[in-house]
């Protein structure tokens, strides 16, 4: 019998514990597939965030270090600088990367750290129960913006790719989405390319994945995908923001 | 044969770290520790090491976390306000049991304070400093030579116990120059099979400080506490100076103990029987030796560059047995030899009247 | 025997390096030595001072409030440290830049026009070594020879400055001896 679909080697043989309809699972899978396709699993070290992906070490079949909230790029820097022959990825949510960890991500990018950042943007804090994230859209209701995010009161959402693209240490930044199979395939390519650039020692790489949080958005998985497409895509334009080639 | 070099305390920390096999340093500028990163920025490339100036103290300590997690000897340094910023990372290092060395070249606080010498971070250093039940090993040298010896020891102990170790000195000790002998020391490296450095030919390693089930987290804490008890049993270090026949014990550490020594010499010239008890490890606190000495003397004077912090540990061991008095300066001021001599004299006169 | 001194002047007068030179020289004579810079607010406004301790025994306090000797290279330093000298101690004054007489009568005062002598032999930057030569001639806590040997080591990379500094030490020493003879 021909095997047409199997678990990537870079994923452990355990079920994900993410909520139903959450896109973390598929993003984990895409990261693992990229690692496998380059044959670098034994040389890859992941850095997990504080947030829903804090237990990433339960799922990835490679060494993983759990960082303090927002500090994953600094932790990855420490590892990469100690082991320049290894490949590092951080896996971070929007609160982790674009709020508490803003300094760390900006400076890792500015230094051109040879790491790959997997940035999962679902416009909300998931693990703490649905508070406003730096990427929460205007008007979006969360636990801490019960009347909807108001520009004057709560500030405006941060576009991370646009923010980082001006930094010269960046080799590759792309924003992709997970709301339908076509976009998932594009995301898969982007993630692989980011790792490829790291293997080629080109510089800092970051893939932003627009993602859903059905539990905290208060929607079904299908409604969530639709909401992402209709609300997030117009504000967070997909595309390559930097590619040094 | 090794030759003595004249070195600043801050630079001696850097060279000692290199001789201890440390090839990774992550830091951020702050006075009065800046000579240390400057020194290592020059030295690390010469030994194929890494010097990285981070964007903040917070980032620096988390780079230390990453490097330590990957199994290398790593150090960071700062001064008081910067060490406050590092506390989050130190708590994580302690919980994840990552060997690392953190230097605090203390300046006066609270707040931005001043860059002059102080010992007012004692509580922060020995009681944990960050959140949770944990301890760093805390070593407090009082000369540039001892800085070299204790920085090396800090790396060895950190590796041995899988625990962060802290070098706690004040600004004066960091700035001053004294002769040092680097001797023929060779670092002993331990195997680190737990390190996250690529899972070739083994199962993946995970390094984390989260144990979400309270039962697991309590077990983790119990294991840490057991380790701390072992460290406390085995690693207490102190110096006793002129204590053999002393009636008065002056307890002091770090640079302050040097001023105390001068004051004791002066008092001894006048026949006052006074000696110094100097904790070298502030955590574990040298309770055993202190206890022995308390049994022999009549009164205790504690001298610190603070409002009185180590005195609490002295009092815990003393447990009400002897009168304990305190002399401290704050805000970057240092007591003079004469000030301390006067305190000793006062106690001496009191004891004489009693007798 | 423990000897301690404070050296003070403007930043750029070589106060720190002069103290370090003395400490190095003491080390070469197998003494215990300590050099401590004043740092922070005390050094604002271009003032510099350092403490040097040379001793046959273990050195205690690095903080010296009443040194046995003070070398001042400018007037503000005289104002600041004149009272600090221990009775019976030594005060070396760079008379080129200090336009008043010290008030103390219970200490030895060594007058040396250090900046003038330094200019005369080629560079005002050597004033520190002139003052050091004068001090060591008056109070040989270590030999001038040891300082000269240290100069050779410290300036191994730029040997061209060694003769000037040696000359500065000698001229300072000479000035102090002439004064003592008078």
Image: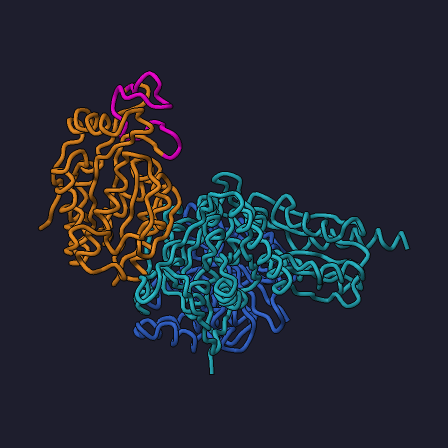
Chain colours: A orange, B cyan, C blue
Furthest-left residue in this view: A245
What percent of the width, then of the height, locates residue B48? 30, 68
Q: Is residue B106 above or below residue A224?
A: below
In the picture, residue C164 is in which quadrant?
bottom left
State the count of labels. Answer: 0
Of the 4 image quadrants, the one containing the N terminus of chain C is bottom right
In the picture, residue B34 is in which quadrant?
bottom left
Q: Is residue B48 above or below residue A126?
A: below
The magenta segment: A127-150
In percent of the image, x 71 and y 61: which residue is there?
B288
What percent of the width, then of the height, locates residue B315? 72, 49
Can you see residue B123?
yes
Of the 4 image quadrants, the one containing the C terminus of chain C is bottom right
B37 left or right, relative to C37: left
Q: Nearer the viewer, residue C150 or B159?
A: B159
Q: Nearer the viewer, residue B318 or B253?
A: B318
Q: Is residue A24 above or below residue A141?
A: below
């Amino acid at each position: 019998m021909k095997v047409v679909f199997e678990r990537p080697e870079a994923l452990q043989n355990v079920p994900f514990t993410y909520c139903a309809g959450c896109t973390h699972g598929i993003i984990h899978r895409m990261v693992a597939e990229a690692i496998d396709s380059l044959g670098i699993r034994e040389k890859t070290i992941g850095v997990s965030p504080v947030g829903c992906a804090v237990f990433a070490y339960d799922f990835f079949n490679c060494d993983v270090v759990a960082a303090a909230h927002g500090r994953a790029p600094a932790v990855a820097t420490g590892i990469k600088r100690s082991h320049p022959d290894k490949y590092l990825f951080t896996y971070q949510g929007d609160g982790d990367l674009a709020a508490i960890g803003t300094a760390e991500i900006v400076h890792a990018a500015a230094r051109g750290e040879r790491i790959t950042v997997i940035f999962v943007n679902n416009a909300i804090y998931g693990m703490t129960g649905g508070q406003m994230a730096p990427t929460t859209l205007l008007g979006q209701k969360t636990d801490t913006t019960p009347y909807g995010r108001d520009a004057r009161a709560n500030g405006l959402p941060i576009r991370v790719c646009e923010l980082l693209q001006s930094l010269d240490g960046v080799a590759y930044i792309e924003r992709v989405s997970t709301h339908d199979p076509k976009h998932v395939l594009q995301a898969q390519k982007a993630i692989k390319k980011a790792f490829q650039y790291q293997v080629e020692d080109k510089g800092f790489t970051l893939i932003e994945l627009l993602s859903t949080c059905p539990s905290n958005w208060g929607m079904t998985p299908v409604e969530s995908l639709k909401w992402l497409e209709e609300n997030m895509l117009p504000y967070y334009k997909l595309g390559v923001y930097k590619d040094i080639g | 044969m090794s030759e003595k070099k004249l070195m600043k305390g801050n630079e001696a920390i850097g060279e000692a770290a290199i001789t201890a096999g440390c090839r990774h340093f992550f830091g951020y500028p702050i006075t009065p520790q800046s000579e240390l990163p400057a020194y290592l920025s020059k030295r690390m490339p010469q030994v194929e090491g890494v010097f990285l100036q981070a964007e903040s103290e917070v980032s620096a300590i988390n780079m230390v976390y990453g490097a330590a997690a990957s199994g290398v000897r790593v150090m960071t340094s700062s001064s008081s306000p910067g060490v406050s910023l590092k506390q989050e990372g130190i708590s994580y290092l302690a919980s994840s049991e990552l060997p690392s060395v953190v230097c605090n070249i203390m300046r006066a606080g609270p707040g931005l304070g001043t860059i002059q010498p102080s010992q007012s971070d004692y509580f922060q250093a020995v009681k944990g400093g960050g959140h949770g039940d944990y301890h760093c090993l805390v070593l407090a040298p009082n000369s540039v030579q001892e800085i070299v010896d204790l920085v090396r020891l800090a790396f060895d102990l950190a590796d041995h116990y899988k625990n962060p170790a802290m070098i706690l000195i004040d600004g004066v000790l960091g700035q001053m120059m004294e002769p040092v002998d680097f001797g023929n020391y060779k670092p002993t490296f331990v195997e680190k099979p737990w390190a996250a450095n690529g899972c070739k030919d083994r199962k993946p390693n995970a390094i984390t400080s989260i144990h979400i089930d309270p039962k697991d987290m309590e077990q983790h804490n119990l294991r840490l506490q057991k380790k701390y008890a072992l460290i406390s049993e085995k690693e207490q270090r102190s110096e006793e100076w002129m204590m053999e026949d002393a009636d008065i014990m002056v307890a002091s550490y770090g640079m302050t103990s040097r001023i105390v020594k001068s004051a004791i010499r002066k008092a001894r010239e006048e026949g006052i029987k006074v000696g110094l008890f100097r904790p070298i490890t502030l955590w574990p606190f040298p309770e055993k030796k202190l206890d022995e000495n308390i049994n022999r003397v009549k009164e205790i004077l504690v001298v610190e560059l603070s409002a009185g912090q180590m005195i609490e540990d002295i009092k815990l061991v003393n447990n009400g047995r002897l009168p304990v008095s305190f002399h401290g300066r704050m805000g970057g001021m240092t007591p003079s030899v004469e000030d301390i001599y006067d305190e000793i004299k006062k106690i001496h006169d009191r004891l004489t009247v009693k007798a | 025997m423990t000897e301690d001194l404070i050296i003070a002047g403007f930043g750029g007068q070589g106060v720190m390096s002069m103290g370090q030179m003395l400490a190095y020289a003491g080390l070469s004579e197998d003494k215990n030595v300590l050099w401590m810079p004043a740092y922070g607010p005390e050094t604002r406004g271009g003032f510099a001072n350092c403490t040097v301790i040379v001793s046959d025994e273990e050195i205690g306090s690095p903080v010296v409030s009443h040194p046995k000797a003070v070398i001042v290279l400018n007037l503000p330093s005289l104002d600041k440290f004149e009272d600090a000298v221990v009775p019976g101690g030594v005060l070396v004054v760079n008379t080129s830049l200090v336009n008043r007489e010290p008030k103390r009568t219970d200490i030895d005062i060594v007058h040396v026009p250090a900046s003038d002598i330094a200019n005369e032999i080629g560079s005002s930057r050597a004033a520190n070594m002139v003052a050091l030569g004068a001090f060591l001639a008056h109070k040989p806590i270590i030999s001038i020879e040891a300082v000269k040997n240290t100069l050779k080591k410290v300036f191994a990379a730029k040997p061209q400055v060694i003769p000037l500094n040696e000359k500065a030490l000698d001229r300072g020493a000479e000035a102090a001896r002439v004064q003592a003879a008078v």
